[in-house]
Amino acid sequence: MHTIPFLQDFVIILAAAIVVIFISNRAKIPVVVGFLLAGLIIGPSSLALVENSSQVEVFAEIGVVILLFTIGLEFSLERLKQIQRSFFVGGSLQAFATVFVVMILGLLIGRGTLESIFFGFLITLSSTAIVLRLYAQRRELEAPQGKLVIGILLFQDFLLVLMIILTPVLGGKVAASFESVGLRFGGGIVLVGLVFLVARYLMPKILHAIARIDVREVFVLGALVICLGLALLTSALEFSLALGAFLAGIIISESEYSHQVVAEMTPFRDVFNSIFFISIGMLLDVRFALANAPIVIALGLGIFLLKVLIVLVIISVMKFPTRISLIVAVSLAQIGEFSFVLMKVGQAQGLMDDVLYQTFLCSSVLTMMVTPLLVNAAPLIAERAQRFVPWGSRTTAQEVPLEIQRQQDHVIIVGYGLTGTNLSRVLKETGIQYVIIELNGETVRRAKLDGEPILYGDATRQDILRLCQVHTANIIVFAISDPLAERNGVRLARQLNPTIRIISRTRFVAEIDELYRCGADEVIPEEFETSIEIFTRVLEQYHIARNIINAQEKLLRGERYKMLRSKMKPMVVSDKMMRWLAAGTTEVFLVEDSSRAAGKSVRGLDLRKQTGAMIIAIVRGEKSHTNPPGGFRVLPGDSLVLVGTHADIEKAFHYLEATEDVSEK
């Protein structure tokens, strides 16, 4: 019987992915690490369950493309503008500094200049797939460190084409002038820009046409064509496939169909993404790694430390606090997946022999394997290490305006995002004094031009909170997207002012108890508050009395949202709600020209017989007519005060809103 060779490999990989996810969840280790280990075990150099890794690599590359596409869907052009400084300044400094330092080190150990530059290319690139996936899971893409990481990684993707163009030149097999390379690279960027502008104009129309067909399969296929098509376009321009997919995601994020596209693409992303990480593990030669373990570990550690130091200095030069610099540095310390593509090009050009290729490959996989652990530990590492780092962004007392230094009984707002901006507007309108602490330098500059009392700094540092007069403040509100920084800031604010009221917003349900332990007086979880708001709107639609809704809101918010966080069903509350639903209530119905009630008498409406509800008063203008007689005629603009059960009131509203004629009785 004929069998498809790859089908067997594909089944083995999927089975390995299932086992890895199960074990990772039980052992509480990052799934990415499990996938890499699974690739090591089933790969050609170990159990050899999968021998042909080249076919797997094709599906792995598709996984990177779809991953970057779904990440792009979570962005918008407005959010990309916020990271332009990270892209141009952070990305360029990180890339060129890394290449320069590696070149110097290569020359010191006796390597040639061109070969050393090529090694600099390899070490410069970090893993877009791993880091952005981890940041998305941690919900830190909007945090300062998340924006920095995204900007630098995107710059590296743009730079990949230049590295691929220059690699044959470094190998000495292709002669190229500065003008030809610059023209090719610059022309590529211009073409990518044109593709982006055209796609941004056409994409909404294409999506609208696909959605109008109203066939789910067409919508799924359309999303895949858009993702892979734009990836192919950028690849044809010699940029990475992932870059085109990311741009496609950003374009679609501007449309009203973005949420549906995310839902349709998520299964594809999860499957192919698992294959990608397993395929990386399969590339490793286990026997070679064991035989050369000291060299592999030393090289991996050297790469890690070198990249950490370079990024740490660069982010500090950009005037970010030491804590943010350390987190970003640790997050970008691994070798990227596109380095493997570049390594193959370099090997073909004679820049790497087989031993050097495998040594660098093993060390690269090692850095990728420890990345999830290091990214999760980075905030704690930064918290402890920043005390010993002699540099870092600081705001001095001389830089603080006098109006901030003299404030008392004011509000301190930590974070000038949407929540912080709205809060500052309300405080300004009510005449309440406030001070804003923000980490984004560009945001601080714009806010200062608008006359806002804003201070650049990190709220986890004593000197910043003291400069904001935390000891005389009445309230401090934390509205940032960095869980560890929020906890540290709450703890520090409580230490500096035991009487201050601390209000903290969080996106993480697991952070509620921890924030209270750190000293918060009130924690507002976004998910629960959204649930309560939806619940309120639903009950209002069923005409539940406002005092009953208020009581239920208090019940849900009571004991730090204990009821919503509990896995047990609150049967007592359900009984109460059933009694409230069965009980009577009052409601007001405004009579419009098109209403059935307009021009009818109370007797003619016969509301009690038709619906069970009863009219107890009619309000006309500023005068109320209680217990109106049967002959009282209802006019447009009157307000009918109804009483009855919730079900009766609902029937009465439907009955009164009807426009059909009713004969008086």
Image (tube, rainbow, N blue to C red):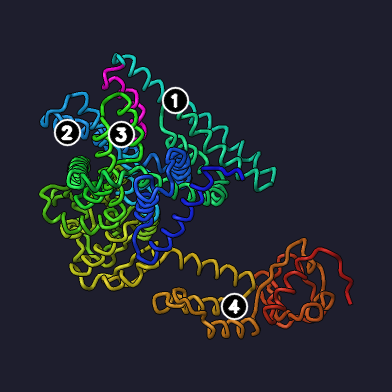
Q: Residue at x 29, y 66 (%)?
A: 475
Q: State which mark lies toward you, 2 or 4.
A: 2
Mark 3 / mark 4, whichever is N-terminal: 3
Q: Label 3: few (<14), some or many (≥20) within 10 Å?
A: some
Kindly identify the amino acid type of the residue bearing the numbered disc 2. Val
- Tag 3 residue: 88
- Tag 4 residue: 545
For label 1, the SS is: loop
Query: In the picture provided, is 357 more to the left or to the right than 568?
Result: left
Q: Verify whether residue 158 appears in magenta.
A: yes
Mark number, residue 237: 1
Quadrant (top left, top right, bottom left, bottom right) of the N terminus? top right
- Relative to the observer, which residue lies in front, 224 or 112? 112
**Chief SS of the magenta region:** helix
Q: Position of residue 408 (x, y in %)?
A: 22, 63
Between the C-alphas of marks 1 and 3, the distance is 21 Å
Farthest-out residue, front:
1
